[in-house]
Image (cartoon, rainbow, N blue to C red):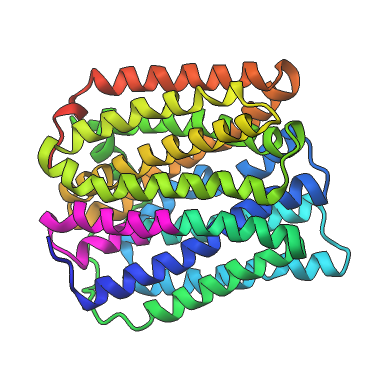
Amino acid sequence: MKLDQRDFARFWAADTVSLAGTHVTTLALKAVAVLTLGASTTVAGLLESARWLPYLLLGLVAGVLVDRRRRLPLLIGTDFARAAVLALVPLLAFTGLLTIPLLAAIVLVFGTLSLFHDAAHQSFLPRLVTRQQLTDANARMEQTRSAAQGVGPLVGGALVKLIGGPLAFLVDAVSYLISGLVLSGLRTPEPPPTPEERHLRTEIRDGLRWVYHHPVLRPMALATHAWFFFSSMVSATYTVLVLDELHFDPFEFGVTFAVGGAGALLGASLAGRACRRFGEGQVILVGRWLTPAAYALLPFATATTSGFALLCAAQFAFYFAIGLESPGEMGYRQAVTPDRLQGRMNGTMRSINRAAIVFGAPLGGVLADTLGFTTALWIAIAGLTVQAVGITCSSVRTARV
């Protein structure tokens, strides 16, 4: 399906630029915590969770506020604000003031801004394309998101190795600045929200009811919450495993994510065609089973060339699964949800998903520190297998836009 709308192209471009920088910072944050500030696995997990803590505390409220306002000004404002916040990291580092608590505070503010941006971002896309184009539009954005994911960690690893982690944060700050400027050029008319009685508790309840009473969204949401919880356990463990336990350098660490980006790009390239042929639900199930299968390779990785190949293979398969299933899942959610509830639907889903990371990432770090990396990984893999079984036995398998 052809997607040639001018504003969609600009929206797509802004998303690509900011995501490229985001993947640089994701790697730089982990490298700064572990290599520059000497964080343990537990502390690294807590720092990872700080980024997502606002989703736990404010996620439902953010969905309500997004539905009350025009979404484009919110997207532009949060992009500019995130650029300013990230620029503080190199400034503090060069003045010798950067500490784990200060870094956590910056990550917390950044996460709050990202919470509002994400809720508005996912809710604005249905205004740019038709309902029938949503899966294809999400697949296109997932393709460039995957490419950014491949390039971002590779560049991030090189930057961390050459100039240090703190300075790498400037790349992401510039990317958000560019994204905000590009979004400023969108001309799609955005009517004011439909007037309705505004009562925070009632509006939150309406969003929760829509997600958790819907026959397909409910099992989809519950399985996705579990997926984020157990995947974050692996993510928190993976950084210290690769950099500290197996002693690969930051560039090699970035290479594993770049290979994952290639997998995500391939998955996203196949997503639209697969969803049209088999239905969104069936494609989602394939992705959910690939996740534990991919991560089952990690416990066998060693500090050798073959071990590095296993790390790359695990990341390729994991991100291939994300690229394959995400466009269909997002397209279905956007297609079945009325515009007046888009912000609350996305806010509800993302807040609980990210709240799962708040608890899962520290738990993964604690398990790795107390029981060892291998045991922690197998516990997470077992949890991911259970969520795959659950979603397979639900009505999600029949979902189709």
What predominant SS class does the magenta segment belong to? Answer: helix
Q: Which residues are magenta?
A: 121-147
Is residue 145 depicted above or below 74 in this figure?
A: above
Q: Toward the viewer: 220 or 197?
A: 220
x%, y% of residue 72? 34, 72
Q: Residue at x 49, y 77 (%)?
A: 178
Is residue 124 depicted above or below 379 in this figure?
A: below
All told, the count of numbered labels is 0
Q: Is residue 104 left or right of residue 234?
A: right
- Residue 395 quadrant: top left
Q: Point out the residue furthest to the right here.
A: 96
The N terminus: image quadrant: bottom left
Q: Residue at x 84, y 69 (%)?
A: 94
- Residue 166 quadrant: bottom right
Q: Is residue 38 left or right of residue 242?
A: right
Q: Residue at x 11, y 39 (%)?
A: 277
x%, y% of residue 28? 67, 55
Q: Toward the viewer: 84 or 265?
A: 265
| Viewer can see residue 239 | yes
x%, y% of residue 380? 53, 22
Can residue 142 be found in the magenta stretch? yes
Can residue 369 be found in the magenta stretch? no
Q: Residue at x 40, y 65 (%)?
A: 15
Q: Is residue 150 left or right of residue 14?
A: right
Q: Toward the viewer: 141 or 302?
A: 302
x%, y% of residue 121? 36, 61
| Viewer can see residue 202 | no
The C terminus: image quadrant: top left
